[in-house]
Every structure is written in C-alpha cells, then in structure tokens.
Image (cartoon, helix red, strand yellow):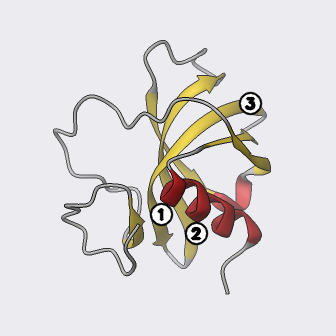
Amino acid sequence: MASATYRLFAQALRAKKQIACVYGGYRRELCPIVLGHSDRAEKVLAFQVGGDSSSGPPADGEWRCLWLAKVERATLNDGPWKSGDSHTQPQGCVKIVDLDANPASPYRPKRRS
C-alpha cells in the first residue's frame, strides 16, 4: 500500500502541480517527474524549482532524487511546473517506475500519468 506522501506526489505529478515540503532539513518546492520504487522504498525524481538546499537555492532549478520516507510536511503548492531543459542522461533514481510525467517515457511506467 502506498504511503500518503506517495499518493500526494502521484496527485501532483498527474496534475502537474508543485509539492512544497521539507527534505534534509531544507524547505523545497518540487515538480515530481518520475515516481516509483528502488530497493523496496518509495522514491521520486523531481525538479527543484524553489526553496533551499545544502548547496543554496536552485537558480534555474536542479534535479533531485528523494526517498519519500524522508519527506516531511508535504503539501500541494501553486507555482509553475518545470521539468528541466535537458534530459541528456537516463535517470537512475527510480528503478521501478510507476508514473512518469513524460508521455513518451522510455521507462515503461506501470500507470499512465
């Protein structure tokens, strides 16, 4: 059974909405792109468009690979949806892809977004 956080990230991905949350002690604004599992744990590949991180605020956005069990205080957030400008390398964050924002996903997601 999926966690409440997983279900919220799936809702955001389908609706192309941001998630505001705390991860690693930093407030972040994320656009979930690929959602699924790795090593039996829920994971998301997201594009961080706001908030902060240990390397400072993302100027033009940054890719993040997150363990959903470590996400705190997640809520849907109004704001622009972004998924990065280039996808030159395959993602290695999520091994078993459940949902992918890319309609032409090469990862064979289990469900359509």
For residue 35, the mark is 1
Cα distance between the residues tagged 2 and 1: 8 Å
Q: Is residue 84 above or below residue 76?
A: above
Q: Are marks 2 and 1 in contact (CB under 8 Å)?
A: yes
> Could you say which is closer to the camera, residue 61 or residue 79?
79
The 10 Å Cα crowd at callout 2, few under 14, some 14 to 19, many 20 or more, is many
Q: Is residue 65 above or below residue 105?
A: above
- x then y, percent, for residue 45: 45, 51
Which residue: 74% across, 30% down? Answer: 26
- Name the residue at 43% across, 16% down: 60
Task: Please identify, in this view, whether the residue under mark 1 or under mark 3 is nearer the observer.
Answer: 1
Label 1 is placed on what type of residue?
A: Leu
**Number of residue marks:** 3
What is the secondary structure assignment of the residue under circle 3?
strand
Q: CA distance from mark 2 to mark 3?
A: 20 Å
Report which residue position mark 2 lands on: 42
Which of the image's four quarters has the C terminus? bottom left
- Precedes in sequence: disc 2 or disc 1: 1
Quadrant housing the N terminus: bottom right
> Looking at the rendered structure, which numbered label has been put on residue 26?
3
Determine whether, in the image, residue 62 is placed left or right of residue 78.
left
What's the residue type where badge 3 is placed? Answer: Tyr
Q: Report if the CB atoms under discs 2 and 3 are less than 8 Å apart.
A: no
Question: Which is nearer the eye, 8 or 92?
Answer: 8
- Horizontal and vertical percent position of residue 19: 65, 44
Helix, strand or loop under label 2 = strand
